[in-house]
Amino acid sequence: MDKTKDLFKKCIEYTIADEVKAQGVYPFFHPIDENEGPVVSFGGRKLVMAGSNNYLGLTADPRVKAASINAINKYGTSCSGSRYMTGTVNLHVELEEKLADFFEKERCLLFSTGYQTGQGIIPTLVQRGEYIVSDRDNHASLVAASIMAQGAGANLVRYNHNNMEDLERVLQTIPETAGRLIVSDGVFSVSGEIVDLPNLVKLAKKYNARILIDDAHAVGVIGKNGKGTPSEFNLVNEVDLIMGTFSKTFGSLGGYVVGDRSVINYIKHNASSLIFSASPTPASVAAVLATLEIIQTEPELMERLITNTDYVRQALIKAGFTLMPSRTAIVTVLISDQIKTLLFWKKLFDAGVYVNAFIRPGVMPGHEALRTSFMATHQQAHLDKVITEFCTIGKELGVI
Ligand code: PMP
């Protein structure tokens, strides 16, 4: 008995977060006390929010707030059950129909988060002996979903990030008779880079693979009317499944997948993360119905988002920063050093700019970065503040 290693030993010995806190540069879990969208408040101090995924700024839109409040008044605060059983309300069905139309697919299925959406699709569709072919830089939720499928006997093979030669090499290693699903982010979440979809589609056709694109960071940002990556490349019909989240442009919480009737029907009746988890709340779904309407009727929001982001991107490039390749709403500044990244983050925070620090284990050593992202509702003064503080601190720390 004495020889048994205590399961919690690793927790007791885990000190890194406390050490970073003691140094005063801890960048995580800071509670916001007020959120107006482009400006947030911490302990009464206002900061420009330059790290949110609220791309069109719709979480603060009075029409969206009113829609959520109305839904609570009609349906209450929770559905208290899974979609499968007692947790479906009219709003879920209405949103599924509208999203299927918006994304030009036959059917849509809602989940309670984007994370659960991947877990509902990948292990359900890719079964024993079949293959998941995954980009090495895919979002952590897709990696977790793929590992879950692997645990049930599926094969997981990875190709180098957005590298279509390597994708072909990997596809050639798969037995001809095995089913295969290529999985990729549409817009990669760390860098903002867009997948090489035209070549990915060509390879999928050549090697008889199905395609799943996670378009979490693409909706409201690229594509016709903000319809995302497949629409951007005019390849909606060639992409079998498109999934996404409501926690970014849609200004809410939840996830969705769209595709052919038979595939969505199969996921609907077999996905564990759907069947055994409570449905999205009426307030969350109503907010998406409202934002979906705004996305479709106010294209100027998307134009402003792109203009705002390009403005910051060009200024940071001109100042000498190294950015990851992106033309979406994400601007990631490479710092390539853990301590410098944390210090830079803290100095920005103190100066009134809130961004995301990407350090290990979120990124590989040497790829530490500050990830910024912008909103349609940022004003010129907000953007100038971000640029000025980046330049001042960048010089101070010898980054530029
Ligand atoms: N996929 C991608 C590409 C994401 O960036 C995220 C969220 N960061 C998710 C899935 C998970 O979405 P959610 O926040 O709704 O769980």
Image: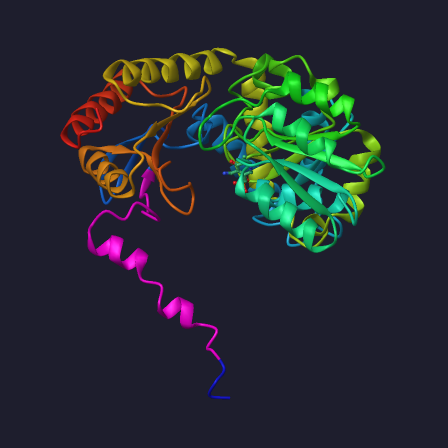
In this view, 120 is above or below 369:
below
Name the chief secondary structure element in magenta: loop
In this view, 208 is above or below 341:
above
Name the spot of residue 188 as percent of width and height, x first.
51, 29
In this view, 228 is above or below 234:
below
Report whether 378 appears left or right of 224.
left
Q: Quadrant of residue 102?
A: top right
Q: Is residue 101 at all visible to an observer of this figure?
A: no
Magenta-drawn stretch contains 106 = no
Q: Quadrant of residue 59?
A: top left
Magenta-drawn stretch contains 25 = yes
Name the spot of residue 268 as percent of width and height, x first.
77, 43
Q: Is residue 130 at all visible to an observer of this figure?
A: yes
Report whether 255 appears left or right of 127.
left
The residue that appears at 31% across and 62% down in the rendered structure is: 15
Image quarter in which the C terminus is found: top left
